[in-house]
Image (cartoon, rainbow, N blue to C red):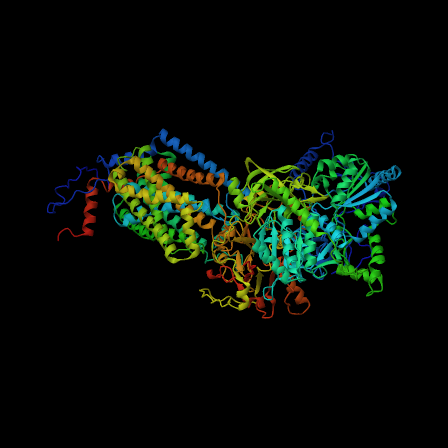
Amino acid sequence: MSDSGVRGDGAPCKGAKHQLVQIQAPEPPVYWKSVAELHGAPRSSGEFPGGIPPASQPGTTRRDFLSLMGFTLAAAGLAGCRAPVQNAIPLLVGSDQLIPGVSDWYATTCRGCAASCSLLVKQRDGRPIKIEGNAESSIFGGGTCATGQATVLSLYDDERLRGPLWQGQSASWEEVDRHILESLQAAQASGRSIALLSGTITSPSTRAIISAWQARYPHFVHVEYDPTSLSAVRAANKESFGLAVVPHYAFDKARVIVALEADFLGIWLSPVEFARQYATARRPESTPSLHVQFESGLSVSGSNADLHLAVAPSELGLVAAALLARVVRKTGHVEPSLANDPLDSRKLDAVAEELWKHRGESLVISGSNDVAVQIVVNALNATLGNIGKTIDLAHPSLQRNGNDAAMLELVEKMDRGEVHALLMLGVNPAYDYHDPARFLSGLEKVALSVSFSDRRDETSSRVHAVCPDHHFLEAWGDAEPVTSHFSLAQPLIAPLFNTRHAQESLLKWLGHEPADYYTYLREFWQKNIFSRQQEVHDFQSFWDRSLQDGLVTAPPSHVPAEPGFHGNWKAAVASILEDQGQHQQTGLAEHYELALYESVAMRDGRHANNPWLLELPDPISKVTWGNYAAIAPAAAAKLKLADGDVIRLKTETGQIELPVLVQPGQHPRTISVALGYGRSKVGRAGQNVGVNAYPLVRVKDGHRQLNASEVTIEKTGRSEKLATTQTHFSMEGRPIVLETSLDELHQGRESNAEPALPTLWAARPEGEHAWGMAIDMNACTGCSACVVACQAENNVPVVGKGQIERIRIMHWIRLDRYYSGPEDDPVAVHQPMMCQHCQNAPCETVCPVLATTTSSEGLNQQVYNRCIGTRYCANNCPYKVRRFNWYNYTDNPQFDFNMESPLGRMVLNPDVAVRSRGVMEKCSMCVQRIQLAKNVALQGKRELADGDIQTACQQACPTQAIVFGDLKDPNSRVSQLQHSRRRYRVLDELGTRPNVSYLKKVRNPVKTT
Amino acid sequence: MSSTVTRVNGKAPAESAPEQVPMLPPPVWVDDNPSLRQITDDIARPLEVRPGTGWWICFGLAVAALINLGGMVAYLVAKGIGIWGLNNSVGWAFAITNFVFWIGIGHAGTLISAILLLFRQQWRTSINRSAEAMTIFAVMCAGIFPAIHVGRPWLVYFIFPYFPNQRGPLWVNFRSPLVWDVFAISTYFTISLVFWYLGMIPDLATLRDRAAGGIKKFVFNVLSLGWSGSHRTWSRYEIVSLVLAGLATPLVLSVHSIVSMDFATSLLPGWHTTIFPPYFVAGAIYSGFGMVLTLLIITRYTMNLQRYITVRHLDKMAKVTMLTGMIVSYAYLTEFFAAWYGGNLYERYHFVNRATGPYAWCFYLMVLCNVITPQLLWFKKIRNSVALLFVVSILVNIGMWFERFVIIVVSLHRAFLPSGWGMFYPTIYDIGILVGSFGLFFTCFLLFIRYLPMIAMWEIKGVVGLGAHKMALSSQEQEEPVNA
């Protein structure tokens, strides 16, 4: 078994120390039967070593003939009996520490996006199969996001390249290396530049390698490019504070959060971290923070805000300026003169009042990529005294380093033919650059273009060499998402294919010896991180511990003083006003604006071939498999548009055609479109799903703007069906999601005195435990991490767009989202809904074959082998949480997703049965995890402790909205929550007695008097 | 029964009851007063000659639909019930609608043969045989749906309490109405089949005696179980008929009551209601009579049996149809009233949605067919017009199919949590299998009228001529003493 790329030193990791399983078997050993055979005699092979006696020989007797006939007859029949071909994963060298069926957990770092969350990955029988957050991380906690959960499936993507490509053809690494080295030498000789174009690089060791390139090649440029960048934040901070950084925000310390078009709970910068902080600051039992969201659409953050105010993208700067003016007025200084407020002045007054009241513990953020807006926001935060409190500029975030201006310049240089070699790491500009034609024409002028992409995508299919990087679960690595917070990444599996660390490629081409990235990484850590700490004195133990923990928090190398604000906010306000003036000249009321955003499922589009993410309903619109033009109900009525009508959106930069979705809460003059869809080369699942909206990105002052202030809408007359998982959004006045107000809660008016409904059923025999769950709807943000976590844990199949249009999604947990209030300014609520594990389960009595029963521990169990599929249980389930296998979703070419391919099926959890066609399935409350925890407790001769068992949805939840535990244990968290004044059970009046209870959503409206 | 005496209609023989007071003439159930031999000839004729073009056209269509059923069911079993339009919201739709529809159809047959026998209704004699055959075939059609609608039809035997039980504690769930259905329907089918067959034995013997020889003779010989026509045989035969009628009578009420419990015992608004058993029974009889009317109007033309299935028969059936239709209408009204008066949020919404939601057209079609159409039958002109009755009977069939569709699909598509709401749209396979079930039904029925006596010869002979008079007398004696 080859060791290359795998942990060479047998470093300890969580669970066990052993070699990783090598998937690709080396050359099979040659067996010999005799010495003569070994020494060169012709090897007898085939089915008939002695040869078949010819039937037509003159000496053939009747007996021979008959025996041959008999043989032929038998053989003809036997030919059909071929042993089935099975693709097993051979463990060529066994390990006494690898116990089949026992999972190991390894700490690593997520590369799903640049947020670089710390992870704990479950490895079972040599395969990573489940991603969890690393609860020991002080930044990210134990939660994850939907994208992070789904990255494990990308590992087993059939579309991944099997090895390097040269000029589009398979080649050996030596060959590719030779070509590239030759070309790099030529570059050096010609004096033309070598460029490395990468996404945000959070890895300090990779940055060190890049610095080495800079030293080695004088004409080397490194450009970091993010399709959805925060480059204006960096530019504004440079101007305001002298630091070109993205600060580290502390939402947990903020009493008032004002977000301007920044979906920090969904996608912005570091959503897992922010969601966690946000939830801790918003516990209704204490004094929850206030959240005001100004945005054009309705985002995850907006749906959680106490006050959601729709503003057009062009008005965002005005809002910031108006808030600044009010705050400045309160300080007694002269305010900038503003002609008029973009929206209801009283609301702005109230927001400014709240901000002022909580000076030093408020936080204003903006997702705008306009420097002027960001300077005004900085001025606001500085005036409010938030710098150094909720905004940490001394330990900035390193999660978004993209520099739009540098990227623009690089493309210019490429076009001018000044770039000899272009290396592209983790980027796909042919897809997401706002002017792909210009980029591609530049690319053609580059003498050597190299991509580290894992597949033939829009860019890598047009480069000279593709040197596929490992998937991060196969790779070593490190990250520094926030200054001084380091994390390590280690491989969970030997590389599935002939891929190579991008860092190793870079080292090799640099001429670094040894080129092995693992050695480099260790050395780098020894030099740079080990040296910064004093706790451990031996590097090996430091390394082992860091690898085991996955993270190290080093004391900062230098602590700069908190900078003071010295930006010119007056000029910024003037620039905003000038912009606004231009808009007013172009005709105000009837013109529409465009806002582009990253969707929670697709993010910037890099995971577009991940069927779990494609099928993940958008947290707000519940649309799967594609993007759409979100349009306000009023605008839809005015333009006579309905859901599914395909419209053409034209801006000055381009045009796209996509279906309409009428989105309550949308700004009436703004149309929102998700980025990340419409990949033309990504793989079978994601190919041409949705429409690519990147061509509508415009550039202003060197920054990519995800909006357009002028968009024309044309009807095409066509119509497309949107695959929506929830078709009705009103609760119809039913007591499903219950709400209370903060005042009522604190005054104790909300009573929990539920009269126990009488029942006709006899008491059930009770077991040792009574499993139950409590879901805090106040903490749930709707981020949908639980949905993908459940899918990964429980082998939930992907069914595709066509089936979702027919309402056949298989997800075991869904997030019901209801609106209340007026259509143009609704209040949204998210309700996680899964099997409620009723004690008097309506599904149970109607099943004719006892395929669903309630266990003595309160679990409603589905017995797949017993189920014949009458669907009576699903009809009688008031919660509609049962899912039927309408077809065979495994190994069925009709459903060409991960469960169709042998590689994709490697992600399946062996502890959970894959359901066949015709059976009902539903949430099992992760019964496999319950059983495992019980076994572990039994082996340890101890009682099960509260928290030993975490369901997949619970573990993934960044806000800890879901609590699972034993209702019989009065001290368990779930039991404690049963006493909450907010606790209720959905549809309890039906007498179903669910074991899942909910905690009411608490409303804390901003008083605008 | 071998008497060949013919008498003038309405005139009692002078010697039989000279001292009796004058009484109304017995009702005439067979036109033209045919001789008994003539009756046998008329009824046996379709079995002995080549069928006409009408029969062949109908049979061709029916067999085509049956072949379509076979193909579609094979595809269904091969691919999975995903080929239907069902979804997470609507787990039952066409298949269960068809099942309830066909089971309901069967009820008229049992009512005619059992209850009307006990009530000594003479008009049943012309129609009971074909109505019973209809029952058998309708239950057969109904029976295929529960079997094919499950996700794994090859395991459908799990639903039977099979012996010996090799599956440990896992057996059937006696709390599930689907298990009750299994018992109810298998009992119903068995009794109906026995009743139908037993009723045919004397006629089979007649056919045996008429058969020239060969296979036909052999088959009828076996089927008639050595019927001799002796007085002792007849006497026992009558008793057995009465006993079987007594057994079958509760089934008329119980089978559809149990079918209705599939819905009534659930939680779902629109299903969860105690009115369902009587409402379903009335609906079943209503739809059954609708179907009997349809069938008999077709057969009396194609088989030239207008003499035996007279307009007076159709009139009687139309009256039953009208009565049961009004019971059904009353049930509809009660449901709406209970939803309003009960004040249950979900139920109230359901009934508002039934009348105003996306499937409101189904509801109004149902009201048109099941509430308004029966009111037409108040008019004798309509009851006596075969063409209009045929239209009415078709409307009844359509209305009752839609009634079940409304109950099943409209209740399911918007249940408790609005997040789980969704529309059902049938696919070609939903519709194809529905059409196919009619193919099965009509294929069986057309074969029946071609190969078996579709009118009970021995019974109808009892209501013509002297028999009619005697029958009238005996029933009068029992009901009210003549000499007060």
Quadrant for residue B444, please give it.
top left
Quadrant for residue B465, please give it.
top left
The single residue placed furthest to the left in the displayed view is: B19
Instruction: Determine if residue A38 is in view.
Output: yes
Q: In the image shown, does A679 or A955 lie closer to the viewer?
A: A679
Answer left or right for A773 relative to B453.
right
Quadrant for residue A717, please give it.
top right
Q: Is residue B392 above or below residue A952?
A: above
* Residue beneath the point at 21% across and 40% down: B28
Q: In the image shown, does A425 or A655 lie closer to the viewer?
A: A655
Q: Is residue B314 above or below residue A926?
A: above
* Residue beneath the point at 15% across and 50% down: B482
Q: Position of residue A763 (x, y in %)?
A: 49, 67
Q: How many marks?
A: 0
Q: In the image shown, does A271 or B223 lie closer to the viewer?
A: A271
Answer left or right for A234 relative to A746.
right
Q: Position of residue B369 (x, y in %)?
A: 35, 42
The single residue placed furthest to the front in the displayed view is: A334
Instruction: Determine if residue B226 is in view.
Output: no
Q: Position of residue A817 (x, y in %)?
A: 55, 53
Q: Position of residue B422 (x, y in %)?
A: 50, 47
Answer left or right for B273 relative to A124.
left
Which quarter of the figure is the C terminus of chain A placed in? bottom right
